[in-house]
Image: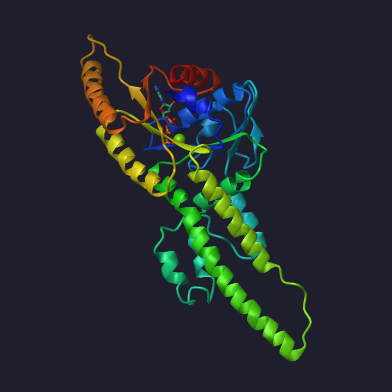
Amino acid sequence: MTLTELLEMDLKFILVGGKGGVGKTSVASSLAISLAKNGKRVLIISTDPAHSVSDSFDLDFSSGEIEKVKGVKGELYALEINPEKAGDEISKVIGKPMDSSDFSNLTNIPGLSELQGLGQDMQSLPQPGMDEALSFAKILEYADDDSYDTIILDTAPTGHTLRLLNIPEFLDSFLGRMLKMRSFLSNAMTMMKSLFGAKGEKDNTIENLEIMKEKVLIARDQLMDQDRTQFVKVMIPTMMSIFETERLVEELDSHSIAHEFVVVNMINPDNPDCQYCSHRHKEHLKNIKYIESVFGKDNITSVDAFDREIRGIKMLKFFADKLL
Ligand SMILES: Nc1ncnc2c1ncn2[C@@H]1O[C@H](COP(=O)(O)OP(=O)(O)OP(=O)(O)O)[C@@H](O)[C@H]1O
Ligand SMILES: [Mg+2]
């Protein structure tokens, strides 16, 4: 099996992740171009706060809106999430400035953290940052929506991605608590109203919370369905990158996210006339043996380090040919 089979899998979500600088964005962009060429309607979303999908395509997707990618065959769209813009919109709704780097504001609503159990629950989970929350909001938006056949997520280096993966559990717990609290308040209000005969408008908060919780579960189920979601592990043949990927695999397994594809990128080609090159080449071959022993069950795709940067649509198409 190669990455070609990944493209034939009819996936809703393809997450591309790994250590910093290993080629995640290049792989994500090339896969997006190839899928669009195969007739799929594709959206590539950067969930990395240090966006580089624009740089990779050598185009500008920084508006915070979905943009059609020009110069590729088929229907390819790109989105770089803009936390500042989204933070402003949320602030308009909740009426106070939102710190774009901190989602833990949610657990600091006055009076809320005093509620027994909530604080403990929240503290036991790594709290997502605003960037991860916004990325998950996109997953929620498209999980039960067919506007795009496939969503490719170009993720940030491992730490951010792990926080993104924790969001469904975080939200499920948070919304569950909110629902319990809300139904207690709602019952208390109904009692007060019946006692004092007050008339009020129908309160839809519980229904809204229940709809949101349902959506979170739909998104979580999609992420956990190996026929709908695959996480592509990108690494370079250095032990540091391999060890980080091994730790990532443990996390992916603990969240039941399928990850059957590995890309080993930037393998140094041999060159007997260059001592540096042949040393690196030998070291890489040795590390690839280790990769094969650890990730032997996966579909491993190996790609050389090229003598120029993978940037712009022409280079991305070249890279896609090598990957596929
Ligand atoms: N096989 C390759 N040969 C040569 N250059 C490559 C190769 N793969 C990627 N590059 C280049 O290496 C750099 C890093 O690649 P890329 O941005 O795709 O990595 P990344 O994992 O997304 O990085 P970050 O962690 O910063 O998001 C880019 O300049 C890219 O063009
Ligand atoms: Mg990147």
Please tell me which residue is depicted at 50% across the width and 22% down the height of the picture.
316
User: Which quarter of the rendered picture does the N terminus lie within?
Assistant: top left
Residue drawn 50% across and 50% down? 132
Specify whether residue 284 is in view.
Answer: yes
User: Is 112 on the left-hand or right-hand side of 261?
Assistant: right
Judge whether 191 appears above or below 55 on screen.
below
- Residue 133, given in percent of the width and then of the height, sits at 53, 52
Q: In the displayed structure, does residue 126 sit left or right of residue 237?
A: right
The foreground one among 246 and 236 is 246
Depicted 1 relative to depicted 233: above or below: above
Q: How is the image coloured?
A: rainbow
- Percent position of residue 157, x then y: 40, 41
Q: Quadrant of residue 200?
A: bottom right
Q: Does residue 132 appear to the left or right of 86 in the view shown?
A: left
Taking depth in this image into account, of 97 and 254 the one nearest to the observer is: 254
- Residue 323 horizontal/vertical position (percent): 44, 21
Residue in the foreground of this view, choosing between 61 and 297: 297
Q: Position of residue 160 (x, y in %)?
A: 43, 47
Instruction: Choose top left, top right, bottom left or bottom right for residue 301.
Output: top left
In percent of the image, x 63 and y 20: which residue is there?
Answer: 73
The answer to whether residue 103 is visible is: no
- Asked whether 259 or 66 is in front, the reply is 259
Q: Is residue 52 above or below residue 74?
A: below
Query: Ligand 1, what quadrant?
Result: top left
Displayed quadrant of residue 126: bottom left
